[in-house]
Image (cartoon, rainbow, N blue to C red):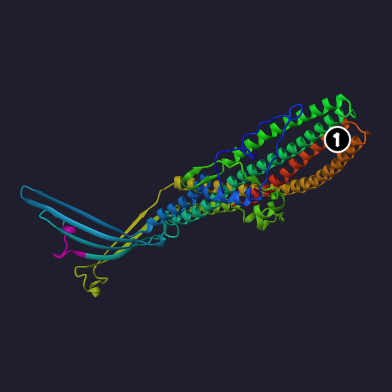
Amino acid sequence: MVFKNIQFPNGSSVLVTLFCILGFTVQGQVVSDSVFTLEEYLGYVKQYHPIVKQAQLMASEGEAKLLKARGAFDPKIEVDYNTKEFTGTEYYDKLNAAFKIPTWYGIELKANYENNEGYYLNPEATVPEDGLYSAGVSMSLAKGFLANERMATLKQAKLYRDISLNKQSLAVNEVLYKAVETYFSWLKYYQEYQVYTSFQENARERLANVVVSFEAGDKPAVDTLEASINFKNRALDVEKSRINYVKSQLELSNYLWLENNIPVELDASLLPDENSFFIADQVLNSSLLEVNEELLENHPKIQTINLEKEQLILEKRLNTNNLLPKIDVQYNFLTSDYERINSLTTHNYKAGLNISMPLFLRKERGDLKLTKLKLQDVEFSLSATKVSLQNKLNAVQQEISSYETQSNIAQNLVDDYTQLVAFEEERFELGEGSLFLINYREAKLIETELKRIDINNKVLVTKAKFAQILNTLE
């Protein structure tokens, strides 16, 4: 693969030099090894395009949020040390070290070491000389038991990771669709340029023949003038199509990058693959499929909405649980000899109970109501998105079928006009026809050929659109 500054396929900038009246010679050289296929082009876009790389950050963001949510279950070490000494008297010297392990369902395991001394120490803080050890558990019996912020955040983070993957897929798919559309535009302008170049060559040869016939006395002078005018019109059409082709090359270069975010321009020796019309379904994964419920359910847009719905269900469960009273209990076994496990008995313990509940629960009821409204909104969005996707797919399928029919008709018209032009040229050579009629027939042939190219381009773009809606371009 070679990329460099854009040039025209003939090697240098095209100079329209007229032949005879204003002679002209242009011949596009198509080298089979220089064809830049759609599949190869998509490979570069998928691997190096910055927006594709940017979309991949969405998945990384989802992983980072999941890691952050899992941090709520990380074991913790806490040390609380306070001391006070004044006028030579040690008021207190207190040390409280704890090791906590948060677990599921609002349960927390805890090991603690406490060592306090001092002249003015609070009597309840008095501990044995070697300190006091404790091991126990704390948990919520109502609010925070079956659902709590820590559990909900972790579950939502897992869902968000999957949402990020779906959003990444949609973003990449959108970039690839625009890239494919640009490739097909490049192909279209290349084919138009080829058509104009071919017919300009015909006009040049016809002008040369008419000049020879005029000099031999077989044709009137007006025929040379008409042939010259026709040639100049063809030269004008060639130049217009050339600039469109060059512009399409530059637009294609917007999607071509190399490693380290280095942009490149397409070398002019590389030409579009004219077989794209026949292999588009295979490359784009756009074969017409029956639009059914299973196909829609697997679509990233639908999956994203379903995952968002699951997040709201978790939020609703948490808000419902928040209506319960807060009942927190804890129980700790106490011992001054940590080396003897049997010293932990029910005779030495520290226990606690904490109960609280708002009287009106306005905040809690408001949060729950808002979540229910969000769920209803997601349900409406889910239904609307399914119908919209189904209708879009059906519409594009109808478009593809119609454009393919139009393409066949256009091809038949091109064949018929080609025969008609050939017939008129034979008559003209025999002295029966007119140059005006040949030019008229040929103009209709060019018009029909351009229509065929445009219709084929619509077939390709519509197939790409079908693949984009299905999200199969990635």
Using a 10 Å C-alpha cutoff, classify the residue at mark 1 as few (fewer than 14 neighbours), some (14 to 19) or many (20 or more).
some
> Please, which residue is most extreme toward the left here?
88
- Magenta residues span 123-132
The reply to whether residue 143 is in sight is: no
The residue under the point 55% across, 53% down is 307
Viewer-proximal residue among 110 and 452: 452
The residue under the point 60% across, 51% down is 40
Viewer-proximal residue among 234 and 474: 234
Q: Which residue is mark 1?
A: 441
Viewer-proximal residue among 361 and 319: 319
Left or right of 52 on screen, residue 388:
right
Residue 150 appears in which quarter of the rendering? Answer: bottom left
Residue 170: percent from the left, percent from the top?
57, 49
Under mark 1, the amino acid is Arg
Residue 452 appears in which quarter of the rendering? Answer: top right
Residue 422: percent from the left, percent from the top?
87, 40
Residue 290: percent from the left, percent from the top?
72, 56
Report helix, strand or loop for mark 1: helix
The residue under the point 83% across, 27% down is 224
Indicate yes or no whether the magenta region holds residue 129.
yes
